[in-house]
Image (cartoon, grey):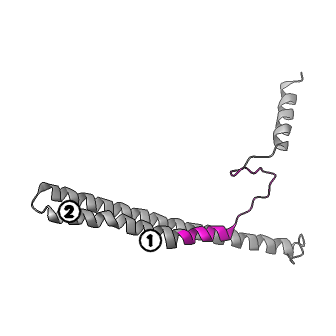
Amino acid sequence: MGSFDEEWARLQAEARDQPLPLPGGGTGGDRLTVRSDAQRAAADFLQTELLPDARREGDRPVGELESASARMSGWASATGLRTVADTWAGKVELLTAQLGAEAEALRGTSNDFAGGELEIAHQLTRLGLVDGTE
């Protein structure tokens, strides 16, 4: 067996030669790609499908709680029901705001990656490393 330094160098070299596992089952040897169209589609789904559904379904219990509170006017339970309705409505607001923020973040990330790719392609073309016809 060699010295510690020799063994350490050998282990480091072996580690560098192994591909890195990536989320989704790929490895570092695979080409990492970002699909801007998929990010935009996910943002659209959040904005047009999930957010309105969350708003509609989240508001439903608020109306029912407020109606029950009105029917129990004069009882201590009415105050409790109004408090629950207000708390629930606040949580629905937070959820829908978060969904909207996530949709905007996906769009922003998509635009950033697409713009970055164009900038890199332009720089590579200017340096003559690619011909710019792709």
- Label 1: element kind: helix
- Label 2: element kind: helix
Q: Compared with residue 133, is residue 113 higher up or lower down, i.e. above or below?
A: above
| CA distance separating discs 1 and 2 | 25 Å
- The amino acid pointed to by label 2 is Ala
The reply, left or right, for residue 31 in relation to residue 109 is right
Displayed quadrant of residue 73: bottom left
Q: Are marks 1 and 2 in contact (CB under 8 Å)?
A: no
Residue in the foreground of this view, choosing between 116 and 26: 26
Displayed quadrant of residue 114: bottom right
Residue at (33% x, 66% y) in the render:
60
- Residue furthest to the bottom: 133
Mark number, residue 52? 1
- The amino acid pointed to by label 1 is Pro
Residue in the foreground of this view, choosing between 61 and 107: 61
Residue at (82% x, 31% y) in the render:
8
Q: Position of residue 5 (x, y in %)?
A: 85, 29
The reply, left or right, for residue 26 in relation to residue 58 is right
Q: Position of residue 9 (x, y in %)?
A: 85, 34
Mark number, residue 2? none
Which range of residues does the magenta coloring cover?
23-45
Residue at (65% x, 68% y) in the render:
38
The reply, left or right, for residue 32 in relation to residue 104 is right
Residue located beneath label 2 in the image? 68
- The mark that comes first in sequence, 1 or 2, is 1
